[in-house]
Amino acid sequence: MGLKGNGRIAKIQGHLNRCKGASKIVQEACDEAMPSNFPTFEGMRHWDTPFGPVIAGDHALQALDAWLQTHRASYSQVHILTDGQVHEACLPFVLGSLEYLGESSVLEVEVGEESKSLEVMHQLWLALLEAGADRQSLLISVGGGVVTDLGGFLASTYMRGMHHVVVPTSLLAMVYAGIGGKTGINLEGFKNLLGTFAPSQGVYVDPVLLDTLPELHWRAGWAECIKHAYLQGGTLWDEVHQVADLSELGPLVPAFMEAKILRVQADPYEHGLERKALNLGHSIAHAAEASLGSDLLHGDAVALGLWVEFHIAHSLGLCNASDQMAMHSLLDTWWPERRSLPADLIGRLRADKKNHAGTVRMAVPGNPGAPVTVIEGSVTGIQDALSYYAFLWSFCFQ
């Protein structure tokens, strides 16, 4: 799985002119595909984080363009990392919105988790080297979670670090993967075993880029939103139960973003429980993803992980039966289909990067808004929860 096209880098100076016309075409297509009341963020929001500023709102791309107007001259080159799907659906609109981008080049990887590999990263490093990129070059990552993870790692490792700007285009990247400074690629099928904590020059979240998001990816991002809401508790947890259509999420997106940002501000490098709480659902999720690969979207894996880890928490007396039932009911509403669990899930779980000295570690929930508990030790309770899930799955198909 590698970079697309004959060459690693495609010059797009001529392409930029097409983009200015294409942006109108893309917008018209979005207007036809989405309802006239498609949600947008009210106003603009700005957060300062240990890993750079996060800007969200209807004019986020204009804010990025204003930043480029001030800083573009200081960069020797600009490279844009994206994938094939985003290149077709969103990139023309993004480029057409950036008057001060100037000459740039596109690095396009194939869609999917398989692109988060050493092989692809090696090709990206070589592509930058062959293009003459230096430490004064700028990388702009435009895409979902795979692209933002990949771009952050690329920028933080090439020549010991180049400047990086993030433009998330999926709900999952906007509320989770694109903010917080974590970067990563996979190793031997294991999720994010290679990675860095790295700052960016800014994360720019513009809701118009959700217009072309496929329905399955809305649901994938929704899993992270549900997790944030439970960890936050209070009205945000109440509000997720009122959502009947994911197109209603627009006004809530800044609240989901802030739920993560506050934890990143309090615990940037995951030394305490504040940021570890964001791993809720992810131990099981990463093991499932490692086994099933591109057959399982990250958000769908998180939904599975939340279901299982809430069962574990209740069995240990860490969360109330009513809270477990509320989470399971919410997940079952949006993920009514059950998935056959991979046979090697426990084995994959033993290689999770959160483990310590060969012992499985997992963040499991308390009650809504309460701190998580990091459990470690025997996998018996995990196996019991997986067996219960598998029993329900088999029952559904009898």
Image: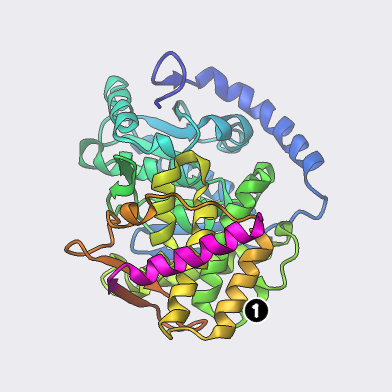
Q: Quadrant of the C terminus?
A: bottom right
State the image coordinates of residue 44 (x, y, percent, origin top left): 60, 61
Looking at this rendering, what residue extends furthest in the left direction?
Answer: 357
State the image coordinates of residue 271 (x, y, percent, origin top left): 26, 70
* Residue at the (28%, 49%) spot, across then down: 193
Left or right placement of residue 353 versus residue 208 in this view: left
Prevailing secondary structure class for the magenta stretch in the rendered image: helix
- 25 or 189: nearer the eye? 189
User: Can residue 124 be seen at all in this image of the molecule?
Assistant: yes
Is 8 magenta? The answer is no
State the image coordinates of residue 356 (x, y, percent, origin top left): 20, 64
* Residue at the (55%, 53%) spot, across then down: 300
Left or right placement of residue 91 versus residue 76 in this view: right
* Residue at the (41%, 24%) spot, across then down: 3
Is 387 magenta? The answer is yes
Q: Where 322 falls versus 393 (above or below)?
A: below
- According to the image, label 1 marks what residue? 238
Q: Where 331 falls versus 191 (above or below)?
A: below
The answer to which image quadrant residue 130 occupies is: top left
Magenta extent: 376-398
* Residue at the (57%, 48%) spot, across then down: 170
Q: Where 265 falls versus 110 (above or below)?
A: below
Looking at this rendering, what residue extends furthest in the top direction?
Answer: 6
Which amino acid, mark 1? Asp
The answer to which image quadrant residue 19 occupies is: top right
User: Can residue 224 be seen at all in this image of the molecule?
Assistant: no
* Mark 1, secondary structure of its residue: helix
